[in-house]
Amino acid sequence: MRCQVAIIGAGPAGMFLAHLLARAGIDAVVLERRTRDYVEGRVRAGVLEQGTVAVLEALGLDGRLKAEGLVHTGTNLAYDGEIFRIDMAALTGGGAVTVYGQQEVMRDLFDAAEARGLRIVFEAEDVALRDVAGERPCVEYRCGGAAHSLSCDFIAGCDGFHGVGRAAIPPDVLRVFERVYPFGWLGILAELPPVNHELIYANHRNGFALASMRSPTRSRYYVQVGLDERIEDWPDARFWDELALRLGPEAASGLVRGPSFEKSIAPLRSVVAEPMRHGRLFLAGDAAHIVPPTGAKGMNLAVSDVAMLGEALVAHYREGDASGLDGYSARALARVWKAERFSWWFTGLTHRFPDMDPFARRMQVAELAYIRGSVAAQTVLAENYVGLPMG
Ligand code: RFL
Ligand code: PHB
């Protein structure tokens, strides 16, 4: 089999890229290790930047998003029993984010892929990248018990943090920068109305908490937990008590408790791999970088990466212009590092660190109080939160 671009992974990065290339008439094949149901079933991101919404619009995939997505023009910070709102729209000249779950985004991408005839191979096993630095790269894989080979012009490694894409870059070329945080997030989904119509990020001396949502009837909540904690130790009653305590009496006054139907723990880390290109292999999304979820940047970065990569591939095929492909890694990394900085800073501001002494705690509270009283500080937060320009 042959195609112009082989895309490894059918997560947000891979599927957005597949649609961007299909729109330009570029022939791509997506190889995904799992089933569609598995990829679509993963409960992950919830907040879309305006740039991500714009890409969905440009692809004509914004029908359900416009009908069901919740536009948030502000977000809230809570600490020491206080709560204040950051008016993102007023501070950024009309900026906003849209609450629309990654599961919904994936459903829209997969439905449209079927309707538009995109080529996706699910349950592709033992995917191996060959000759990525040469002129004739190729991807070998197994599917339905048979061995296949896909020759291509370029390979897009959109296969997440544990994929084969990053591993195909030789160790003497690849540099990896990393911070592992000494805690994780315990998240639940519950078919209950959210405590507030916008998100609340809370810093409590017990640790961080986040009140989010998926719809007016579905709540998504998180509490910071130690890495040694087990889900079995967090029955719903304990979760609700801890969440209410951390949100504070004012924010938690409207909290509706009930059974959760999903509960999981995710570790937090910051990772960047450089460069994002090696020969004819291009990395995008979690394959190249991870952010802690505090800034809600992970899926949005995957989309901004492939928007840049898609643009570069289109310029290559339409005009024979290689400058976009040559500049892809530097252009993508410039935006990635800014999102890494924001996610790292916001994590540091809102979480309890095990080695935190009373001085460090006072510093957090002083910074939160400063943000509360400063339009300049709120503007910095707001412009990062709604999403920096593509650059
Ligand atoms: P993905 O989604 O991991 O998809 C990669 C795909 O590649 C497949 N794959 C392979 N296929 C073939 N061969 C192989 N060898 C393969 N190895 C892997 C995998 O099966 C998978 O389908 O990466 P992608 O596309 O780069 O997308 C990244 C996002 O999914 C991720 O950044 C976000 O979910 C992060 N994230 C959030 N992002 C936001 O923008 N806003 C948020 O509010 C937000 N909240 C979150 C999050 C992630 C979380 N967790 C669980 C990590 C909240 C949480 C709790
Ligand atoms: C979510 O709704 O899952 C969510 C929202 C905001 C974040 C992270 C996750 O910062």
Image: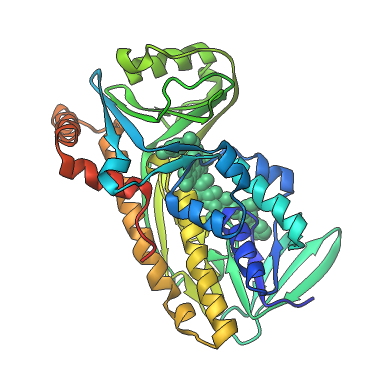
Q: Is residue 125 left or right of residue 194?
A: right
**Spot occupied by residue 276 in the image (x, y as percentages of width and height):** 46, 69
Q: Nearer the viewer, residue 354 or 197?
A: 197
Q: Inspect this view and state whether residue 33 appears.
A: no
**Spot occupied by residue 337 in the image (x, y as percentages of width and height):** 34, 59
**Spot occupied by residue 197 in the image (x, y as percentages of width and height):** 43, 26
Q: Nearer the viewer, residue 205 or 56?
A: 56
Q: Is residue 377 left or right of residue 112?
A: left
Callout count: 0
Picture quadrant where residue 289 is located: bottom left
- What residue is at 61 percent from the left and 77 percent from the top? 154
Quadrant showing the N terminus? bottom right
Q: Is residue 316 above or below residue 361?
A: below
Furthest-right residue in view?
145
- What residue is at 41 percent from the left and 49 percent from the top? 291
**Spot occupied by residue 169 in the image (x, y as percentages of width and height):** 52, 71
- What residue is at 42 percent from the left and 48 percent from the top? 297
Q: Is residue 112 above or below residue 251?
A: below
Q: Inspect this view and state whether residue 361 appears.
A: yes
Quadrant showing the C terminus? bottom left
Q: Nearer the viewer, residue 63 or 267?
A: 63
